[in-house]
Amino acid sequence: MKETRLIGKNIIITGASGGIGAEMARLCAKHCANLVLIARSVDKLESLQKELSGQYAAQIFVRGLDVADSEGVRNVFGDILEQIGHVDILVNNAGFGVFRHAHEAGIDEIKSMFEVNVIGLMACTSMVLPGMRERRSGHIINIASQAGKIATPKSSIYSATKHAVLGYTNSLRMELDDYGIYVTSVNPGPIATNFFNIADEQGTYVKNVQRFMLQPDYVARQIVDRMMTRTREINLPRWMNAGSVIYALFPTMFERLGKRAFNQK
């Protein structure tokens, strides 16, 4: 069944070469949206473009870009806006994490995580906001994490980037409320993607949480189903979000009782 809200909409998805980014692209193409798919891996994007163009009557463009390159973001998004005219939906999905104790994290690694997960997300958003404000329409969807709500050992840097994404998203939502622009944060738990090839080099965390892992197609469907709707947050799985509520109310107790589980990375 096609989602009529998305027919003809211009949608940009960063980090679209795999995982939930690629799954969102498949669903949006099925709903007859026009897509601009962005990632560093151009070959993977072109393969996805070929797959989707052969199945659906949607315009699909691909652009290679490292969102950590602010000048590159300006140039690529400038070209995109000239090509398609305007952006209806931006999904800031590009990001990565590395699980290490804080004293083991090198400064270059720390900078890289913030440049991609935070600065890159803000840079991409800043390129589409003027047009959305002028048209008084649009949707910004930022992929954050449950780690942005509940920080755990060995994820101090990654959690800090996602805390920043949530702070930015919440402020942006209030700024744009009078302009008819929707702003949504997506806060998933662990997803079965190649994210953990980098984040969890030893495979310890994946082994410990494998039974709780979300499937990328399920996460993508939850996001696409809420595009162009006034949705504040998408929290997956729901039981994990309940933990963040308890954490906010009883942080000391939560950290003490959850200590064993938190140290499974």
Image (tube, rainbow, N blue to C red):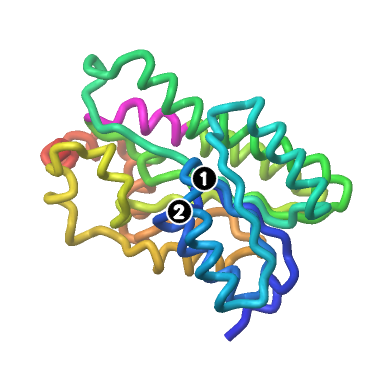
Distance of mark 2 from mark 1, alpha carbons? 9 Å
**Looking at the image, can residue 167 be seen?**
no
Residue sitting at x 45%, y 53%: 44
Q: Residue at x 46, y 64 (%)?
A: 23
Position above or below: 68 against 193? above
Q: Nearer the viewer, mark 2 or mark 1?
A: 2
Residue at 62%, 64% in the rendered image: 227
Name the residue nearer the viewer: 135 or 22: 22
For disc 2, the marked residue is 44
Rendered view: 54 above or below 93: below
Q: Is residue 34 left or right of residue 240?
A: right
| Residue at the spot of label 1 | 39
Question: Would you say 97 lies left or right of 72 here?
Answer: left
Q: Which residues are magenta?
A: 154-163
Amino acid at the residue labelled 1: Ala
Q: Earlier in the sequence, mark 2 or mark 1?
A: 1
Classify mark 2: helix, strand or loop.
Answer: helix
**Quarter placement of the C terminus:** top left
Rendered position, 220 above or below 207: below
Name the element at disc 1.
strand
Residue 12, percent across and down? 64, 53
**Residue count near mark 2 (Cα–Cα under 10 Å), binned few <14, some 14–19, many ≥20:** some
Answer left or right for 238 relative to 46.
left
